[in-house]
Image (spheres, rainbow, N blue to C red):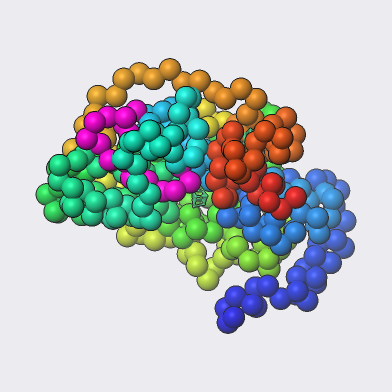
Amino acid sequence: MKYLDEYRDPELARTLIESLRRRRFDRDARLMEICGTHTVAIFRSGLRQLLPARIQLISGPGCPVCVTANEDIDRSVWLAQQPGVTITTFGDLLRVPGSSSSLHVERSKGADVRIVYGSLDAVRIAREHPDRQVVFVGIGFETTAPTVAAAVRTAAAQGLENFSVFSAHKLLPPAMRALLEAEDLKINGFICPGHVSTVIGACAYQEVVDNYRIPCVVTGFEPLDLLQGIGMLVEQIESGKAEVANQYRRAVSWEGNVAARRLIDEIFEPVDCTWRGLGVIPRSGLRIRERWREFDAGSRFSMPAIQVREHAGCRCGEVLRGVMTPPECGLFRKVCTPQDPKGPCMVSSEGTCGAYYRFS
Ligand code: SF4
Ligand code: SF4
């Protein structure tokens, strides 16, 4: 397969691994991948086992399903319970348990909860069902936010009065800062996400590098991309440098997708937001701006205060912060499986627990 096979060449991979093994580390390199797709790619290619022991790969809060806070799941459940409301969202979110229910459970009880593959599908459903209030539960990082912003603009252009967005969107760089400020976590470098970076650009990590002196390498998803990205990080760590480097130049530019960023900025504004496992992170969420408030589900519906309850025994918060691995959770494989998940990290196809379950 042209343009793909060359990033999977086993000979080249062996050479890169050998060159990493030949390096004489005098310190550990704890590298965090902050993207669920990287987590799965690393497992799939067996990279963890092939790297020298001093290079440790830690999974971070890279899946939007996993980092969605219990309270946001609870609010979505409350919305699904309202008469005349249709909930539309991405498939993985349905099975994530909130404090006492999930969208999946509500659907089995008769709520109108529909899986869509894009936010414009939700706009179409609203257009076809003018008698119902259609709410799109929007999760995702800077990669999905522009499409949701476009959906709001489309709904406005079509004069739809029955479409709104419950925004649980999140921004990655503020989460990186929060991780670096956590006392129980030592990170020596970030394997920065390929997809998100196509929008925010490699420039988005400059601030993290400047303030925390931590190397950041934007990396692609094929085995050779990852090996090269890891090599670039190790090189910086060894030479005491901290820079933003871009291994994934074929997809990511320094400034990113300026039009997509403008679109996000037109519809959304940054707001303090709760992440599962990381707590409230300043200016890390996206709220619909005042000008577009009629499309904000939080403004359209008067949601009551909800008593949030965390799940007994589930350690997703610690898994998401990279301070423990899934097998260290007492529920892993015993009572928590992809068929019967107790936490979002097992639900999501790119969640760390799900990846450990399938590949380890
Ligand atoms: S599992 Fe779902 S939410 Fe998480 S990264 Fe993949 S597609 Fe996105
Ligand atoms: S194994 Fe299950 S219960 Fe344990 S942290 Fe992962 S998702 Fe949560």
Image spot of residue 341 (x, y percent): 59, 37
Ligand 2 lies in quarter: top right
Q: Quick check: is 56 in the magenta stretch?
A: no
Q: Residue furthest left?
A: 159
Q: Quadrant of residue 184?
A: top right
Image spot of residue 91 (x, y percent): 44, 48
Q: Which residue is at 63% across, 55% downward? A: 40
Q: Residue furthest front?
A: 109
In front of the other: 126 or 4: 126
Left or right of 61, for residue 74 = left
Q: Is residue 285 visible?
A: no
Q: Quadrant of residue 332?
A: top right
Q: Which residue is at 39% across, 20% downward? A: 306
The quarter of the picture where the N terminus appears is bottom right
Image spot of residue 204 (x, y percent): 48, 51
Left or right of 277, for residue 24 = right
Q: Which residue is at 80% across, 72% downward? A: 15
Image spot of residue 75 (x, y percent): 37, 29
What residue span does the magenta drawing correspond to? 78-93
